Image (cartoon, rainbow, N blue to C red):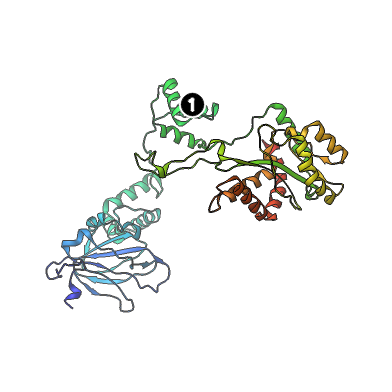
Amino acid sequence: MASERKCCVPGCNRTREDDNVILHKFPNPENEPNRFNTWTFAIGGDILSLNDIYVYKYRRVCHQHFEKCYWTRNTKLTNNATPTLQLKGLVIKRCALNDVTNEAGCATAAAGCSTSNEHIGIKASISCDAEASTSEEAAQVVALLQQGLSQRAVAAQLHLSQSAVSRVYRRFQETGAFNRRPRTGRHRCTSERDDRFIVSTSLRNRHLTGVDVQQELRRVRQVAVSEWTVRRRLKEANLTPKRPASGPKLTAGHRQARLQFAREHLDWSIAQWRSVLFTDECRVCLHGSDRRGRVYRRPGERFAQCCFAETVAYGGGSCMMWAGISLEGKTALVFVPGGGRGGGLTADRYITDILLGHVVPYAEFVGEDFVLMHDNARCHTARVSRQFLREKELRTMDWPALSPDLNPIEHLWDELKRRVRARNPVPASVDELKTALLEEWDGIPQETVKKLIRSMRNRLQAIKEY
């Protein structure tokens, strides 16, 4: 029994006989429904009686260790529970569960609370904060006062300070509302004209940074604010910094050709796109990367070997390849000679290695509805290439210039590169790179190809909208 009266702080042997201030914590039973994360603290005296049908848990903390109370997370009260307690020298403190995790606030637990020697009912929905925190509490204050109760009685019943009850009722008489009047808040350091200037300056040149707009505001309007203030004003206008989308530079003629192509093919059905073979060439560098990597380093480690990104001249070698995709399947991955003297994909090599070796057999498989899609590269538009296509009666799609975003195979190249970069170990030579490309190309599922080609309508619709 003596051990139960001791303080729960390890190493403390103080008992309630040594100090008449003990912190008790009592929860509602765990089997009650609708439990709220709420705590109840009884500071001082002994718990003389509890409802026998409930099982309560509490810990004792002596007055000496009250400033570093040990909070436990097993205390929960239900919304409708009203445990009846009889305590001697009682002080009640209520707070939410997320407020009691801060041990620094434990010492103020008894501030502003009242004492009582009577049977006290504690309800989970009522707080003993000094202010009426919700409109429901304010309405309850007004209702009790209109029933004839004094402010002192209302404050004692609702566990509020008498000044809070007085302010709530005075506010109700003046405004007829239970909610507090909106606060003005901190004064803005920019006027409405300054805000409009910030937004218009950013809209005139979308590539200006927050510092640029800040300096322009200081130069023109003689208003000195921080860069973060400028960013907040832009965010209020729904302007947020994003990485710009990149693409080839288009002239008015290019835009008109793209729009005309979109209008002509927007209503194509899946059956019509099924007969199209989308083709393209792509170069993959052995040590290349399509993104800027980052490293986590300490000050002074900029040139440390573990934080250094080594570069290789010309990417350490590369592979030039060609392929085609359709709703029916993928062609083989064809490697073509690299650039330089006598290298690169010339018109003659395009005819012999690509058209004769892969396109013509595929066209015979599809039938007379076959359509070849290739871009406006020199080897594609050369006179001998166009003459060969006419002789073989191969119909080509009038593809607009500088439109890689319309070709679904571009996304497949990106998928292929990601797969090769994810290999472990990564290719260390050009021959290993070719082997990895062939294996990963064969591993791309046909369902991925179908999804890309079925997105043609969305691609064309985007051109019309922008």
Q: Position of residue 407 (x, y in %)?
A: 70, 42
305 vs 242, nearest the viewer: 305
Q: Quadrant of residue 26?
A: bottom left
Q: Quadrant of the C terminus?
A: top right
Q: Position of residue 148 (x, y in %)?
A: 32, 58
Instruction: Give SS at disc 1.
Output: helix
Reading the image, the residue beneath label 1 is: 197
51 vs 58, nearest the viewer: 58
Q: Position of residue 193 (x, y in %)?
A: 46, 26
Q: Residue at x 38, y 26 (%)?
A: 224
Height in image: 305 above or below 79?
above
Residue 89 horizontal side relative to residue 176, left or right:
left
Kindly tell me whether residue 112 is visible in this rendering.
Answer: no
Q: Quadrant of the N terminus?
A: bottom left
Q: Quadrant of residue 218?
A: top left
Kindly tell me whether residue 346 is visible in this rendering.
Answer: yes
Residue type, mark 1 in image: Phe
The residue furthest left is 18
Count the numbered circles shown.
Answer: 1
